[in-house]
């Protein structure tokens, strides 16, 4: 499973819920990008590839480069619609993690599920991860 996290576009409470849920997903290939201050706000897993970014959309560019198309699950953690096209075209199931107010109708698709971990304490996120990483 791929996990792409735009740390610049999610608040720290949502990111904390995501980090906690990912601890139970040992097979995840996690890439986190964002400004150094956003990255330093949390303790990322040592397995995560943490990429400091600078400039407008710097994190988006790093995450786009890290993405690889396959039929495995993809978790996108972002607070904006910059990855809507990627989510719609990904061959496998996609979980969009973001705030309710930031969800774009562009993220709609048959394989796309959206959740706001702040709304349910991360329950839907943990459930999706459990199903996506099950052997």
Image (spheres, helix red, strand yellow):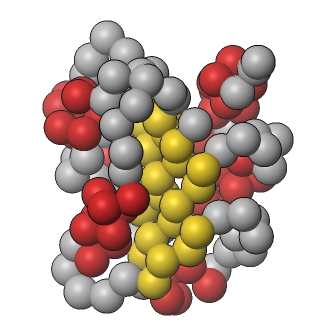
User: Which of the 4 image quarters holds residue 117?
Assistant: top right
User: Which of the 4 image quarters holds residue 49?
Assistant: bottom right
**Residue 26's x, y, as percent?**
78, 44
73 vs 58, left or right, is right
> Residue drawn at (51%, 65%), measured in percent from left and top?
32
Q: Is residue 47 visible?
A: yes
Q: Nearer the viewer, residue 34 or 67?
A: 67
Q: Is residue 104 visible?
A: no
Image mark count = 0
Residue 78 sits above or below residue 57 on the image? above
Quarter of the image with the N terminus in it: top right
- Taking the view exactly as shown, the residue that stands out farthest to the top is 110
**Residue 45's x, y, as percent?**
75, 65
**Residue 90's x, y, as percent?**
31, 29
12 vs 45, left or right, is left
12 vs 74, left or right, is right
> Residue drawn at (80%, 49%), measured in percent from left and top?
23
Residue 2 sits above or below residue 63 on the image? above
Residue 108 sits above or below residue 8 on the image? above
Q: Nearer the viewer, residue 92 or 76?
A: 92
> Residue drawn at (52%, 43%), measured in percent from left and top?
2
**Residue 65's x, y, as percent?**
31, 61
Residue 98 sits above or below residue 72 on the image? below
> Residue drawn at (76%, 18%), measured in percent from left and top?
135
């Amino acid at each position: 499973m791929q996990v792409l996290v735009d740390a610049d576009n999610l608040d720290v409470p949502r990111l904390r819920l995501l980090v906690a849920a990912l601890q139970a997903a040992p097979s995840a290939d996690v890439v986190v990008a964002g400004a150094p201050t956003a990255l330093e706000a949390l303790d990322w897993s040592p397995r995560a590839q943490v990429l400091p970014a600078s400039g407008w959309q710097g994190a988006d560019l790093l995450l786009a480069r890290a993405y690889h198309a396959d039929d495995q699950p993809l978790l996108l953690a972002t607070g904006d619609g910059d990855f809507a096209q990627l989510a719609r075209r990904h061959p496998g199931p996609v979980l969009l993690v973001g705030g309710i107010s930031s969800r774009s109708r562009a993220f709609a698709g048959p394989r796309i599920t959206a959740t706001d971990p702040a709304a349910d304490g991360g329950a839907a996120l943990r459930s999706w991860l459990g199903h996506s990483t099950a052997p």
